[in-house]
Image (spheres, grey):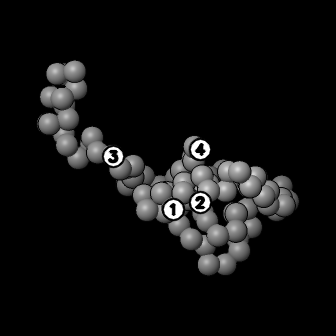
Amino acid sequence: NPEQTKWQKKYPNLFSNKVGEYKGYEVKLHIDETVKPRQEKLRQVPFHLRDKVELEIKKMLNDDLIEPVIEKQLGKADGITVKSAMSL
C-alpha cells in the first residue's frame, strides 16, 4: 500500500516491530480500601504448553513487557510482573 509506505517513511520510529511505551501521564487507580485483599493459588501451566509459555516469557522479557520479581508480592504471580496482555 503506497499510502502506508509513505507514513512509514515519514515516521519510522512509530512503525517498528517493538512495543512502544507511553511516558508523561500518571495513572491513578481507584481502589476500594474496604475490600480485603486475597491471594489465589497459582495455576500450573499444562505440560504440553510449557515450552510455548517459556518462549513467550523470554520474548516478553526481551521486549521489556515484563520484569523479574525478586520477592513475592501480593497479587502478582511468582517470578514475573505483567506489564501488558500476553497472547499465546
Q: Is residue 35 visible?
A: yes
Up-down: is 71 above or below 24? Answer: below
Relative to residue 41, is residue 62 drawn left or right? left
Q: Secondary structure at mark 2?
A: helix
Q: Position of residue 1 (x, y in %)?
A: 22, 21
Q: Are marks 2 and 1 in contact (CB under 8 Å)?
A: yes
Instruction: Name the kind of residue labelled 1 in the image.
Output: Lys
In the foreground, 30 or 10: 10
Q: Position of residue 22 (x, y in %)?
A: 39, 51
For the point 27% across and 40% down, which residue is it? 15
Q: Which residue is mark 2?
A: 54
Q: Which residue is mark 1?
A: 58
Q: Are marks 2 and 4 in contact (CB under 8 Å)?
A: no
Q: Which residue is mark 4?
A: 88
For the point 49% across and 57% down, which residue is it? 60
Q: Which of the two labelled residues, at mark 2 and mark 3, occupies the earlier sequence position? A: 3
Q: Secondary structure at mark 1?
A: helix
How far apart marks 2 and 1 lie (CA) works out to: 6 Å
Q: Secondary structure at mark 3?
A: loop
Instruction: Name the kind of residue labelled 4 in the image.
Output: Leu
Q: Which of the two labelled residues, at mark 3 and mark 1, occupies the earlier sequence position? A: 3
